[in-house]
Image: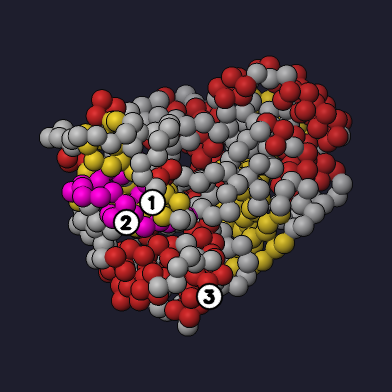
Amino acid sequence: MLSIVEQTRLHVSKNTEAKKKSRFGQFFTPERTAVFMAGLFPDSSGRCRLLDAGAGIGSLSAAFLDRWLSGNFHFQSVGLDAFEIDSNLHPYLSKTLEKYNNHNDFSAMIRGEDFIHAAVESLSADLFSESLVHYTHAILNPPYKKINSHSVHRLALRRVGIETVNLYSAFVALAVAQSARGGQIVAIIPRSFCNGPYYRPFRDFILRYTAIRHIHLFESRTQAFKDDEVLQENIIIRLERGGQQGLVKVSTSTDDSFTNLTIHEHPFERIVFPDDPERFIYIPASSEKNAIESSPAIRYTLADLGIKVATGPVVDFRLRKYLRDMPGPGTVPLLYPGHLSNSGTRWPIEGMKKPNAIEYNADTEKWLYPSGFYCVVRRFSSKEEKRRIVAHVVDPTAFGDVSVLGFENHLNLFHENKRGLPQALAHGLAVFLNTTAVDENFRRFNGHTQVNATDLRLMRYPSRDTLIELGEWATGRGELTQAMIDAKLETLAE
């Protein structure tokens, strides 16, 4: 049956305009991913009340029901609520479910209403609203689309105590809220909720009401929905409503063939650190701790070090009238990521698409920093770049006799009370941030290409003296290889 559904998925996806996919946040689940997701549910018996919210053409429901009919579930009956707001998909969804209608112990309802509004009305227990059942199982590929703070969806969610910024997290939160105690929820969702301040309320909600049982990570960002050319890092997660948190299974595969599947179990303390106020969700790539986790020497916060980190304050489109292609009288250097490379700072660059300078006047001075040594980290990396964290040292001697510097918004900069760092400290910080262990540790909680100042602020670092020692070592070595800086970190971590 699924092979027919898969053919339908490919046909419908190919013939659906990109604008419509974007409007609905609509990306259909490939067959192999649907089967894998259905296989994550533990065997169960009794009466199954199944939710498929954002059902599309029914790929996930079919995978779940095929597993049941093959004898891998022991349900007495299955009742399915399939929510799909796009009425154009209902004929395909109906056709997918036709096969299962021959079973007296199966019933299905295709619901065309908005799942968010239906679930909120049910949860808010309005006298005139229809109550949904408490689901024992939910399988979801929810829509991916941002919701602004004043939208009808955001206001509706607040009625039931859910605060979130995307449809996918709203669907998962409502599926959890509408689940029976012990209910199992399996969803394929972007990894972006694992860190960052915007998803903090959602993480709090998930960690309060569920136990995380399993997380699956795709090593490639392009494979989960490759037919739709989605460049978003996705995970598959299984949650248990009201469960007692224990070990968490973490599996990885290169792509949706799942042929090189690896599985490890981790204590929950490796997934959510007990002392982390932001409740970041880490996804370890292996069972072994790296140098960052295992070293007692790497335990200091930036506040301990007397260092701060900030996003570059020059937002170019807001200060466009003050930007200049090349330096001239009354201007100072403006640094973009393109000015920084492994060989050092190159400025100015003729013919660069970005400006090289900004006027220095009463309107711009509050956005500028005193000239000095700074450690900077690019905020964005390319989709499949080897490193997520890329750090450089800004050397003031590259700019001649200037009093201030401009840092564009695509850079994060480490500073001391809005002034430069001691030279050795800036170099030591850059070397530490460029180690493989730091990059691997960062990838455990950051699933997108953006490196925020908040992420860097919450990391742990060696002591200030150790960073200075590392900087002095680095400046006397000339060009450093990755192997050299990784080996040096190992000596510091001992």
Q: Nearer the viewer, mark 2 or mark 3?
A: 2
- Neighbor class of circle 3 (other Cα within 10 Å; few <14, some 14-19, many 20+) is few
Which residue type carries mark 3? Ala
Residue 395's label in the rendered image is 2
Cβ–Cβ under 8 Å for marks 2 and 3: no
- Neighbor class of circle 2 (other Cα within 10 Å; few <14, some 14-19, many 20+) is some
Q: Is 306 located above or below residue 206 in the figure?
A: below
| Residue in the foreground of this view, choosing between 204 and 482 | 482
Taking the image as shown, residue 407 lies to the left or right of residue 447, namely left
Q: Is 52 located above or below residue 393 in the figure?
A: above
Label whose residue precedes the other's in the sequence (2 or 3): 2
Q: Secondary structure at mark 3?
A: helix
Which residue type carries mark 2? Asp
Image quadrant where one finds the N terminus? top right
Q: Is residue 460 visible?
A: yes
Residue name at image x 36 percent, y 45 percent: 347
Residue 345's label in the rendered image is 1
Which residue type carries mark 1? Thr
Q: Secondary structure at mark 2?
A: loop
Q: Is 395 located above or below residue 101 in the figure?
A: below
- Neighbor class of circle 1 (other Cα within 10 Å; few <14, some 14-19, many 20+) is many
The CA distance from mark 2 to mark 3 is 25 Å
Splitting the image into 4 quarters, where does residue 84 fall?
top right
Residue name at image x 65 percent, y 18 percent: 17
